[in-house]
Image: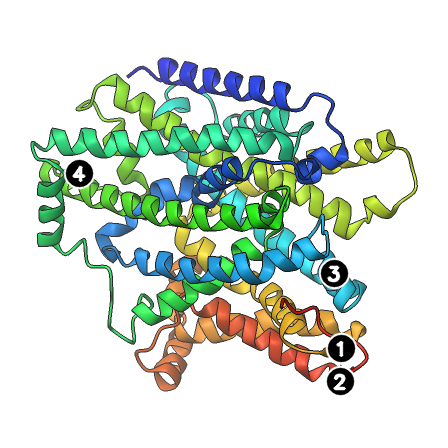
Amino acid sequence: MSPVVLFSFVIGYFLLLLGVAWYTSRNSDNESFFIGNRNSNWMLVAFGMIGTSLSGVTFVSVPGGVGSGNFYYYQIVLGYLLGYMVIAFVLIPLYYRMNLTSIYTYLEKRFGINAHKAGAFFFILSRTVGATARLYLVISVLQIFIFNKMGIPFEATAFVILLLILLYTFEGGVKTIIYTDTLQTTGMLVGLVACIIVIIKTMGTDFGGAMSMMADKGYTQIFNWDVNAPSFALKHIVGGMFIAIAMTGLDQEMMQKNISVKTLKDSQKNIMTFTAVLMFVNFLFLVLGGVLYLYAAEKGINVPPDDLFPTIALSETFSGLIGVIFIIALISALFPSVDGAITSLTSCFCIDIIGLNKKAGTEKEKKNTRLKVHFTFAAIFFLMVLLFKWINDKLIIDFILKFAGITYGPLLGLFSFGILTKRQLNDKLIWVACIAAPLLALSVDMLSNPAWYEAKLHLSMPLLKEWSAATFGKYRIGNELILINGLFTFAGLWLISRKDPSRLSLQVV
């Protein structure tokens, strides 16, 4: 299909989003932007969170990973189920009881200002890098299959996409995103199912036949019982549990939408409904990956994993309709993870870093400050996307999970220490503990996985390999990295803490 025609569908989709944004942002204020006036419909939030949680990386990298990792990714998804139960019945009640706008305000009330700032800092760092990595991946796909053919440079594509995202988020914030995420999740899921059906029919089989063919190839294997492998079942499940707790329950972007729901009970229903749908959708993405690899083997297609889905969907074999469906589904998967990230980062910086809600001034002055912060984060996103283009990394989901394991560890340690203990921290040493733990976790992970870092850093590390063999043998740290990091943080906080019987920890009863 002509890239101009595909581009026209992209523009049409943006115009639809702008229409929704205009309608939902009327008479909006800072409370609408930050927490949607605490009046969001829980069903809309649950459905829209699917798109935010999955993103364009899931749409491209999860299917692409099936060729080398079978269905092992689903072990992580099973861990998510356990993590989301902790969020629903431990963290959400805590946030509602304290009536929080930013979840990191809990850390200030529990430990002091430095804990609050540290929590906000690690969220900002994690979400900025993670969201821009996702953004880069999808822009790269659009660039290869549409904009390069139109003579439009990558930098212009990234700039325009971020500008358009700004246009529909800068006014309404969370209030708008609740509705745009619902629209975009619908587009993504319709596209996912349609692509599976079309590719299976093209191969001349049905769903059952495709599953049998995948089983013959070994793709449908879910559990890996090799204890030394990074994808060992227990490591993936435990790692997935703590990834869910940290990247959803301790993440302002995800929780900002949850605490915008009117009541605690509805927010809990939102989390559990979201979990059930998420598990089913992730399975469909893995099925899609298996189908893509079967089709690629049949047609002799050999491309990098992240390029497999777009290469097949936009090939001349399929009708123009499947190309349009793919592009709409891809951008539908992209925008919920980017618009929500910019909005939550703006909220976090305004509330947690500069204390906008505590400052004197008119509503108009505060709104102007918030808009400046919002545009600044958009500029940072643009620069980070250019940095990822320069690095030109593939299979970005590996990088995102690894980076999350390093940066979300301090959040996991801080919140768990606050909830599980009655001890008080030395406020002046909190930063030392929260910075030392990720550095120690990174060092341990490098020692366990020297080959991964050699490939990513394009360096030869023979000495590190020798140390790794002597220390870890064949064992490789996987997604349990986030738990290791959280334990390091917890231990560091314990060393700088003291008993304080006069202050009870804010435990959930």
Dot 1 corresponds to which residue?
A: 424
Left or right: 331, with 99 as reference point: left
Residue 109, by quadrant, is: bottom right
Secondary element type, mark 4: loop
Q: Nearer the viewer, residue 152 or 266?
A: 266
> In terms of sequence position, does the residue under pointer 3 or pointer 1 come before the other?
3
Measuring 10% from the left and 33% from the top, which residue is drawn there? 203
Dot 2 corresponds to which residue?
A: 499
Task: Kindly report the distance in space between the C-alpha atoms of the residues bearing marks 3 and 4.
Answer: 51 Å
Amino acid type of the residue that numbered disc 1 sits on in the rendered structure: Gln
Dot 4 corresponds to which residue?
A: 301
Above or below, 18 against 333 in this view is above
Q: Is there a contact, CB below 8 Å, between mark 2 and mark 3?
A: no
Secondary element type, mark 3: helix
**Mark whose residue sits in front, 2 or 3:** 2
Query: Could you classify mark 1 by the number of other residues whose Cα lies within 10 Å: few (under 14), some (14-19), or many (20 or more)?
Result: many
Secondary element type, mark 2: strand
> In terms of sequence position, does the residue under pointer 4 or pointer 1 come before the other?
4
Mark drawn on residue 116: 3
Amino acid type of the residue that numbered disc 4 sits on in the rendered structure: Ile
Above or below, 156 against 349 in this view is above
Q: Is residue 316 visible?
A: yes
> In terms of sequence position, does the residue under pointer 1 or pointer 2 come before the other?
1
Give percent across and percent down for residue 168. 61, 25
Query: Could you classify mark 2 by the number of other residues whose Cα lies within 10 Å: few (under 14), some (14-19), or many (20 or more)?
Result: few
**Mark whose residue sits in front, 4 or 1:** 1
Q: Is there a contact, CB below 8 Å, between mark 1 and mark 2?
A: yes
